[in-house]
Image (cartoon, helix red, strand yellow):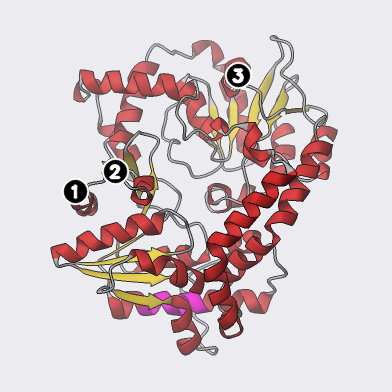
Amino acid sequence: MKWCFLVNSASLLPIFFGKLAKEIVKTGDDCLVILSSKYAEYDKKRFFPNEIKFISAIDWIVNNHREKEREFYGLSWKEFFPLFYRNRWGNVDYNKSIRITLQHIQFFKFILEKEKPDIIISESPGGLFHEIAYHFCKRNNTPYLGMESSKFNDRMDIYDTKYLTCSKYGKTFNQLSDNDISSEEKKYVQKFIKEFISHKTSVLADDIQLNKVYFSQFGIVIHYIKRLKDMSGILLKYLIKRKAFKDFDCESESVVKTALSAPFRMEKRQLKILLQKNVFSKLGAEDEKFFFYPLQLQPESSTSVCATYYYDQLNTVKNIAFALPFPYRLFVKEHPASVGLRSESFYNELKKLPNVVLIEPGESVQELIRRSDGVIVLTSTVGMEAALVGKPVYVFGKVYYSHHPFCRKVSSFEELKEKIEEDAENRNDVDLSGLENINNRFIVAHFRNTIQGTIPLAAIGEDTNNYKQILIDLKNFIKH
């Protein structure tokens, strides 16, 4: 079997993949590592055994890109969108966009046709490089698996779609009955849900402590010096050879410019935090009628890939607000990790809307869900929390929990309006007596499609991951 890892500049995943690759070598299987950038090559290659095959995507593109070959194999500008919105360092014009896309297309066409991997493993597609890899895997019937730490302790999620989800969740949920679930599993589910909706589960976005975005001036300097020290050797190595690669290597260019601009961005953020202190409102009277929309952190693949057409959250909130029936308001809560990142004009435009209330980041999500008449999300984890307590959830994006019966998938603002009106008419008929059974099936279906292991453990001294078993589990996953 030939395993192929796509490795970028992410911090933890390459270390985990390196240890997995060592186990692959022990089994006698073939292993190929594709390095997405020169920065990834200089920094991440060291985590892998020397005897496996490495391919630098940038070196291949520099030497093999054919300017006159312009076949796009069914790809659209949607796949280019995440790169465009993550690019804060200058214009990406039409010709450059086409050139970058064709370079990646030709590279992955070569990989799938010439290297013929049996499986490609990486993160879920969150940018052009991985989007095109996934696209060619689908064309060639080659499994593409994204790996990520799970919401369940000591487990990992395996995603076989491009939308941060697994195609098996819904199928397993529909096949399960109450008799298929053991008493031990039911106890586990109840404990998990209790911790999840009370925000004791650390993976919840809103567990981020607000004070983590506040730094002293001394703290900013120390943080920057330490970070620059960690990266200095790799940055210098890239800068020496930058002239040969900068027109081909978007990822390394972004890493370098982000590193060099970090203190200025941190100072700018601190200033915004001070100036925006009085922008937000607290939750008001108990009898207020409202729907709840949690703003999402950006740029993230959870919106740029999984909710592309609703990525402009200012415009999305405007359309949601005017889709609501009278006399409802829309309570919009800022994401704690976004404090100091959005412009003042963003908030001012929201506050101009007559039925929008901008809720402060520290307000209780649990309380907002309880008091609302429903939750409207792109892909936020808040939607899953609301569904688990029996609130109607209106989902615009592609998300792993959308098969929960309390979720309503919506594909337009007009459809949102219609579904809210329909739910209002049937509100007295809602039966929560079967919610526990639904939640048992929902959580167990997700849990059974995860595997044992923890990605961050790969980076610490006492790594208790069983990489041999992880390989076996991955093989079983693609067989079934």
**Dot 3, how many residues are within 10 Å of its Cα: few (below 14), some (14-19), or many (20+)?**
few
For the point 28% across and 20% down, the residue is 186
Instruction: Name the residue tied to disc 3.
Output: 424
For the point 70% across and 61% down, the residue is 261
Residue type indicated by callout 3? Ala
Residue placed most toward the observer, 359 or 325: 359
Q: Is residue 104 magenta?
A: yes
Q: Which residues are magenta?
A: 103-110
Residue type indicated by callout 1? Gln
Q: CA distance from mark 1 to mark 2?
A: 9 Å
Q: CA distance from mark 1 to mark 3?
A: 49 Å
Dot 1 or dot 2: first in sequence order is 2
Callout 3–callout 2 Cβ contact below 8 Å: no
Total numbered labels placed on residues in the image: 3
Residue type indicated by callout 2? Gly
Numbered label attached to residue 453: 2
